[in-house]
Image (cartoon, rainbow, N blue to C red):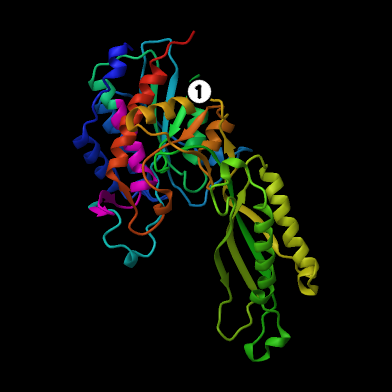
């Protein structure tokens, strides 16, 4: 890469950027549905048509699920597809991976949306143009921004020593199946990326670390009887009440001291109860309650440590109650198991992304850790790949009704990723 090429950044084709983003957003790629595969096939075709070297493979879900470090799944899948698209370098340069998940969460209550969740609408928020649809922020806009950056460099005719790999992945929302399979695929092919950018919604800040998140299930047993004789039964709901209080106290204890990267959050490691199901008849004392929830895992804490503290709290509640002492609450760990993850703060990648952002915007991005789990921990922990999240959109609107992404952030992200690719892949290894 010449100095002239570095100073005159390739232009982003905004029409293509918008068109490809809209196309992707109209595919209802909810985890576990056929459309989760459709969106992967769509990208494989589009990237092959642009001349990228596309690798597409069936992910053996059953085989991967038996491995010791499998990250878990929360939805049933009949099929999963892995895809990469590579723009090879001229040789002697680093390899940069751009990883983005294409699966989205269900839209939820459709009456809460002002439109069909998979029909893209351009509107405004606080005077700023936005695109609204499920997956707009989380995270199809970021993935398409990466695509636009790779295309801009190719159309400018710039040859770089290093290689860029685009990797859309499935199953991020419920554990990380796609990235887990990707890391193994790259290893089998002898490919060792020197860095990875995940354009998750960070409002164009840098996130080099994530707390973990473990999905749990509590099973509380009671004793059924007719409601008119309720004192002769044992309500599983009533036995659950002191457990809720104890878990709130546990959450408070686990957040007294947090890593400096996480101090911006009022609650760095939340413990959330997501679903509660009990009883099967209004006039029957309920004899079974199940509760599914999420346990935040601290930076630097192992999954085993977090589970042990949680299980000890449940056991303590049971020990203080005669019924629960004889019929203890069961704790089950199922679904997505997100360990915490952190990139080395001295990684050159962080400086390159921050420098590219400064070059494009004239401002310095903030750097902090995120309180949610992500594929970053798989890329760092299993692949040994320095990884940073940097992308358009606000994580606060992810998973919400009327999810949206600011158009100016999508454009800026694409422009910054152009500079990151030039900076990273334009270097020659010494």
User: What SS does tag 1 mark?
Assistant: helix
Q: Count every numbered label the image shows and give the total.
A: 1
Looking at the image, can residue 84 be seen?
Answer: no
Tell me which residue sits at (40%, 56%) in the image: 106
Q: Image check: 337 left or right of 35?
A: right
Residue found 65% across the figure and 63% down from its top: 248
- Tell which residue pokes out farthest to the left in this image: 15
Lateral position of residue 420 relative to residue 406, left or right: right
| Residue 86 vertical position relative to residue 305 in the rendered view, above or below | above
- Left or right of 322 in this view: 286: left
Quadrant of the image occupied by residue 96 = top left
Highlighted range, magenta: 123-150
Q: Quadrant of residue 274?
A: bottom right
Q: Is residue 145 magenta?
A: yes
Residue at 43% from the left image edge and 53% from the top image edge: 396
Q: Position of residue 43 (x, y in %)?
A: 31, 35
Which is more toward the observer, 366 or 273?
366
């Amino acid at each position: 890469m010449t100095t002239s090429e570095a100073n005159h950044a390739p232009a982003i084709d905004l029409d293509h950027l918008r068109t490809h983003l809209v196309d992707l957003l109209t595919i209802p790629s909810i985890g576990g549905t056929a459309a989760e595969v459709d969106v992967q096939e769509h990208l494989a075709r589009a990237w092959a048509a642009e001349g990228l070297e596309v690798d597409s493979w069936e992910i053996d879900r059953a085989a991967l699920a038996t491995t010791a470090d499998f990250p878990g799944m929360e939805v049933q899948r009949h099929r999963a597809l892995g895809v990469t698209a590579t723009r090879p370098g001229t040789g002697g340069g680093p390899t940069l991976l751009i990883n983005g998940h294409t699966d989205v969460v269900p839209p939820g209550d459709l009456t809460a949306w002002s439109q069909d969740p998979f029909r893209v609408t351009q509107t405004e928020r606080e005077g700023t143009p936005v695109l609204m649809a499920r997956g707009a922020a989380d995270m199809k806009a970021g993935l398409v921004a990466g695509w636009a950056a790779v295309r801009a460099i190719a159309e400018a005719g710039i040859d770089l020593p290093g290689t860029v790999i685009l990797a859309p992945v499935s199953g991020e929302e419920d554990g990380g199946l796609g990235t887990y399979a990707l890391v193994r695929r790259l290893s089998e092919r002898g490919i060792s990326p020197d860095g990875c950018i995940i354009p998750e919604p960070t409002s164009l800040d840098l996130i080099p670390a994530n707390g973990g998140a473990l999905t749990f299930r509590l099973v509380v047993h009671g004793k059924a009887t007719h409601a008119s004789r309720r004192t002769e039964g044992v309500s599983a709901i009533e036995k659950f009440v002191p457990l809720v209080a104890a878990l709130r106290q546990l959450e408070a204890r686990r957040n007294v001291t947090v890593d400096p990267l996480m101090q911006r959050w009022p609650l760095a490691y939340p413990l959330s109860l997501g679903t509660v199901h009990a009883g099967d008849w209004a006039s029957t004392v309920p004899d079974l309650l199940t509760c599914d929830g999420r346990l935040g895992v601290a930076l630097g804490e192992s999954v085993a440590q977090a589970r042990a503290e949680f299980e000890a709290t449940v056991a303590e509640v049971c020990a203080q109650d005669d019924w629960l002492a004889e019929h203890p609450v069961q704790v089950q760990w199922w679904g997505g198991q997100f360990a915490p993850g952190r990139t080395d703060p001295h990684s050159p990648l962080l400086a390159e992304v921050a420098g590219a952002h400064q070059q494009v915007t004239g401002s310095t991005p903030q750097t902090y850790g995120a309180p949610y789990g992500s594929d970053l921990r798989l890329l760092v922990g299993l692949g040994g790949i320095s990884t940073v999240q940097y992308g358009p959109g606000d994580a606060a609107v992810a998973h919400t009704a009327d999810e949206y992404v600011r158009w100016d952030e999508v454009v800026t992200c694409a422009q910054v990723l152009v500079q990151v690719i030039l900076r990273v892949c334009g270097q020659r290894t010494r």
